[in-house]
Amino acid sequence: MKVLVTGIGLVSALGGTLEDSWKNLIAGKSGIRLHQPFPEIKSLPLGLIAQQPSELAMLTQMVVTSALRDAGLVPPLADCAVVIGSSRSYQASWERLARQMYKDAENLPVSDFGNWLDILPHINAIAAARQIGATGMVLAPMAACATGIWSIAQAALLIQTGQCQQAIAGAVEAPITPLTLAGFQQMGALAKTGAYPFDLQREGLVLGEGAAVFVLESAELAKQRQAKVYGEILGFGLTNDAYHSNSPEPEGKSAIAAIKQCLERSCLSPGDIDYIHAHGTATQLNDQMESMVIQRLFPQGVAVSSTKGSTGHTLGASGALGVAFSLMALKHQILPPCVGLQQPEFDLEIVTAARLSKKIRQVLCLSFGFGGQNVAIALSKSP
């Protein structure tokens, strides 16, 4: 059963809407700026949507509303499945609660904790279901930086197997918290000046906020509704390295397996792919492994770019943002640039400035998460 994308909601450091983010992306702009949101942590380049860190619930409500409006749908949508994931979920709320507890450990009554059940990791997906009046299945995937594509794949599978005809799927991330920043600093993974994917002088990742959700529908329902269509989800691949908590498997064996699985399920060969939206975190290990995998599997000359130099690394939401930008590339036949790249280290056909191409038919989006979680999803131009 064909699965089509009929609506997109997106917010990022590049803009408050899909259109604004896309416009700024193809103009080669970046939403990354120096910020110091917490006095105990020095200024860092961050992809903030506003001047201060955003709230997860607000971002979710915003993109869900935008996606439904874009698809021409009006709640309640009782039969719509909800698959919305997050890597950090309500971590910011838990950190505030922990600080409050330690500050007033002897005097704080339990009643002052508020309803802590409302900030359990899966509640964000439940809140989205309440927002749209969905009374069917709700899933809340959590697969580190692979979460976004993982969520879209799970929703597509629900439709392909006839469990539902319509789903809203994607990921939301508000990861700018003291613990997250301190943790990545301790790992030596944070950049000092900016994000430069695949660059010889790359420094590391830049954390960013963002969210992207999609309305997915069976081809039959989309046709019945006469819905506009961004593109089709052809297939996906999901694997795990079973190797290390934060380092990719050096030879990329499971990443290669995920891509091969995706291509086989999509009835595509490597030569059929016209553009690859890479994970491209600008860290030493990821970019090296990912470049090796692309070179090993795909013919020389396939266009490649990462959009994290513009949005920052939105962790669990990054793959969802990548899918949105890839669908816009299919719609407008424009290859988005790898902003921040000055001196490529790898022998890839990296897009350094947006360029018009009338031959974008099939695209591939990649994400590789901590814990060795690998995902690939293939998309095609709207039928």
Image (spheres, helix red, strand yellow):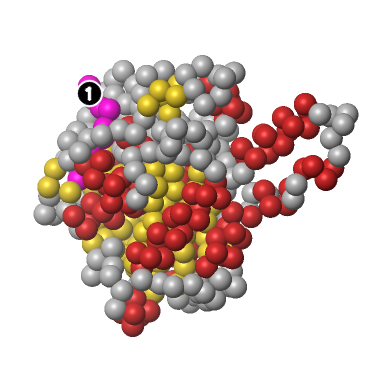
Residue 169 appears at what percent x and percent y?
Answer: 47, 60
Horizontal side of 323 relative to 345 (left or right) equals: right
Quadrant into which the N terminus falls:
bottom left
Which of the 4 image quadrants contains residue 220? bottom left
Horizontal side of 211 relative to 72 (left or right) equals: right
Amino acid at dot 1? Gln
Residue 162 appears at what percent x and percent y?
Answer: 48, 77
Residue range of the region highlighted in magenta in the rendering: 335-343
* Residue tagged 1: 342
> Could one spot residue 366 in this view of the protein?
no
In the current view of this chain or complex, which residue is farthest to the right?
Answer: 106
User: Majority secondary structure of the magenta segment?
Assistant: loop
Q: What element carries label 1?
A: loop
Residue 333 appears at what percent x and percent y?
Answer: 17, 53
| Other residues around mark 1 within 10 Å, as few (<14) / some (14–19) / many (≥20) | some
Residue 143 appears at what percent x and percent y?
Answer: 54, 46
In this view, 128 is above or below 314? below
